[in-house]
Image: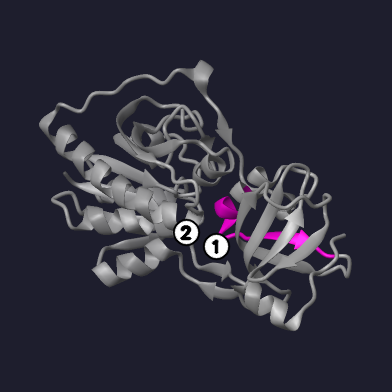
């Protein structure tokens, strides 16, 4: 099928690579303009733009795909299907009704509609998650679902491990959906709106680990935000100690917010259980094992 692909992130780039290797390779890729990213605030292209250039695919970088110029470029590509994955822009009329629009969404809809489905599934300690290919509609991830695939969510799996696994699955699922669409056999099932949950965007305040909360919830938050966002503990000194890998335990009783050393780890007392810090990141430094941190630091006092 002749397609146009709309995406932005690393996740979307993985899906694009799979799509480009299929009979449905896009005639046009649409992604936002270059922007300032990372700690250095260097102007960089979105991952999808970098891959489109590598693939030699016609590329449009647009601040809004709904603008007249962008809409004209999409129409000129004469797509039989528009494909959307982690794009970050709302698609409005008349583009919304131009042709069939399929969206790759990394959750088991209707659970975790919204901006941060992978993070929210990990934070909620869901036993499973997955990917859906759905028809894009005006509602927030509320369109009917065509295909879905489930994966077990490992108890120690962080975002950095789970997202690529779901992206690879999403690419395969999208190609399968396009094969069925080309044959005229792609069927859709309406979602149960009453069962919907929402994956709100991660707020900056959520990065802080509150020792009053249970250790199992804090460990899940660390996994959900590693490595792309990052969780941290606020120290009495006013600095932040980043936490890149942690696990929960009830083996060593500590008061909430009390910190102790345990050979190769830092132990933090919480509202229920102990949070075992295994990889940390001092302010202005690089991630290091807790054992390496303890060679140059005493167990810190928390704010």
The answer to whether residue 31 is seen in the rendering is no
Position of the C terminus, as image quadrant, is bottom right
- Please indicate whether residue 191 sits to the left or right of residue 58 in the image: right
Find numbered disc 1 in the image and state the secondary structure of the residue it sits on: loop
Q: What range of the chain is rendered magenta?
A: 221-235
**Snapshot quadrant of residue 28:** bottom left
Residue labelled with disc 1: 227
Q: Earlier in the sequence, mark 1 or mark 2?
A: 2
Position of the N terminus, as image quadrant, is top left
Residue labelled with disc 2: 160
The answer to whether residue 96 is seen in the rendering is yes
Residue 227 percent across, percent down from the top left = 55, 62
Residue 3 percent across, percent down from the top left = 24, 47
Marks 1 and 2 close (CB-CB < 8 Å): yes
- Please indicate whether residue 61 sits to the left or right of residue 239 in the image: left
* Structural distance between the alpha carbons of marks 1 and 2: 6 Å
Does 224 lie within the magenta span?
A: yes
Find numbered disc 2 in the image and state the secondary structure of the residue it sits on: helix
The vertical placement of 87 against 49, above or below, is above
Which of 170 and 53 lies nearest the eye of the viewer? 170
Residue 39 percent across, percent down from the top left = 63, 73
Which of 149 and 262 lies nearest the eye of the viewer? 262
At 20% from the left and 28% from the top, the residue drawn is 186
**Snapshot quadrant of residue 136:** top left
């Amino acid at each position: 099928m002749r397609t146009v692909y709309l995406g932005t992130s690393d996740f979307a780039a993985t899906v694009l690579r799979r799509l480009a290797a299929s009979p449905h390779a896009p005639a046009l890729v649409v992604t936002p303009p270059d922007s300032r990213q990372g700690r250095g605030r260097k102007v960089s292209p979105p991952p999808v733009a970098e891959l489109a250039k590598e693939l030699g695919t016609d590329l449009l970088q647009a601040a809004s795909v709904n603008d007249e110029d962008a809409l004209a470029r999409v129409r000129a590509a004469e797509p039989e299907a528009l494909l959307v994955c982690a794009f970050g822009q709302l698609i409005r009329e008349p583009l919304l009704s131009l042709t069939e629009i399929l969206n790759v969404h990394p959750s088991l809809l209707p659970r975790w509609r919204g901006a941060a489905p992978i993070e929210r599934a990990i934070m909620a300690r869901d036993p499973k998650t997955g990917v859906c290919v759905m028809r894009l509609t005006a509602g927030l991830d509320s369109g009917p679902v065509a295909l879905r695939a489930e994966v077990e969510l490992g108890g120690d799996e962080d975002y950095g491990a789970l997202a690529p696994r779901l992206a690879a699955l999403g690419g395969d699922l999208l190609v399968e959906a396009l094969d069925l669409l080309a044959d005229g056999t792609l069927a859709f099932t309406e979602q149960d709106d009453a069962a919907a949950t929402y994956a709100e965007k991660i707020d900056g305040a959520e990065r802080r680990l509150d020792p009053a909360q249970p250790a199992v919830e804090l460990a899940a938050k660390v996994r959900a935000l590693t490595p792309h966002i990052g969780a941290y503990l606020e120290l009495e000194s006013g600095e932040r100690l980043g936490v890149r890998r942690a696990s929960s335990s009830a083996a060593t009783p500590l008061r909430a917010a009390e910190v102790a050393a345990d050979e190769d780890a830092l132990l933090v007392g919480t509202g229920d259980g102990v949070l075992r810090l295994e990889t940390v990141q001092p302010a202005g430094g690089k991630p290091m094992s807790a054992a390496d941190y303890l060679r140059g630091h005493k167990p810190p006092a928390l704010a």
